[in-house]
Image: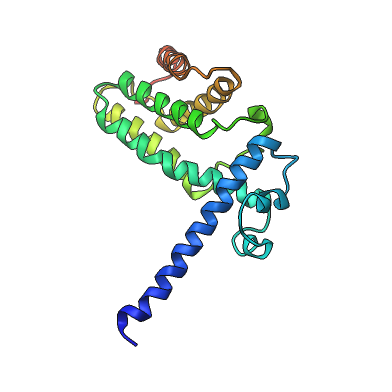
Amino acid sequence: MSEAAAIEPIGKRERTKVANRQAILAAARRVFAQMGYDAASVRDIIRGTELASGTFYNYFRSKEEVFEAIADDAAHRFKPLLRAARERARSFEDYLRSAFHAYFAFISEENKIDGRPIDERRPHVRSDTPEMMAVYEEVRQGLEDAIARGLAPRIDADYLACACIGIAQEVGAAMLRRAPANVGAAADFAVGLILKGLDGAPRRG
């Protein structure tokens, strides 16, 4: 057997695994949106794919694991958008506006499936997974870079990163409850809140 022939089945199996996993995540997004997270079951997710139930359990043990995978997948895809916002920003305000706008546009696109109200589509999302922590680190590094370049006040970058993420999550959720979702208005509000709030934040030595 040639080397190429020996390698090809392995490559095909890996592609199949990736395709199956993505099919499960895509079905779960639809099911959670249309039925609500609490009402949805693993069986509902499986019905949304062409996979056998046994195949599902090769990848996930529960709908909780599926949702965590969805959240991590979204964080993984969003991080490059956040990096791009930092790299093209001309000022601290420009960075904040670009980052918030990117996030609000991203979640608006992610939740465009018609169905249940946004609060019914998801449980509490863990913030300690590797992908979620990578997003936090990208935010913190962006803020530290702005502070080091004299573009932002010398305040606690860790606290500020947590504040920005918290504001993004809560304002983003509120934005999604409105129809239509106004990405620009949400970004303007978040940026204004951060910039005005910085006036009262203690400076670091």
Name which quarter of the figure residue 203 lies in. top left
Name which quarter of the figure residue 137 lies in. top left
Instruction: Name the residue nearer the viewer: 3 or 124.
Output: 3
* Rendering coords of residue 191 (x, y %): 42, 17
| Quarter of the image that includes the C terminus | top left
Residue 107 higher or lower than 133, as above or below: above
In the displayed structure image, the side of residue 37 where residue 72 appears, left or right: left
* Rendering coords of residue 52 (x, y %): 65, 62
Residue 128 higher or lower than 11, as above or below: above
Name which quarter of the figure residue 184 lies in. top left
* Rendering coords of residue 172 (x, y %): 53, 24
Furthest toward the right, the residue is 39
Furthest toward the bottom, the residue is 1
Q: Residue at x 50, y 26 (%)?
A: 168
Q: Report the colour scheme.
A: rainbow
In the displayed structure image, the side of residue 50 where residue 35 appears, left or right: right
* Rendering coords of residue 12 (x, y %): 43, 69
Q: Residue at x 75, y 40 (%)?
A: 39
Instruction: Name the residue nearer the viewer: 53 or 152.
Output: 53
In the displayed structure image, the side of residue 113 where residue 42 appears, left or right: right
Instruction: Name the residue nearer the viewer: 31 or 170.
Output: 31
| Quarter of the image that includes the N terminus | bottom left
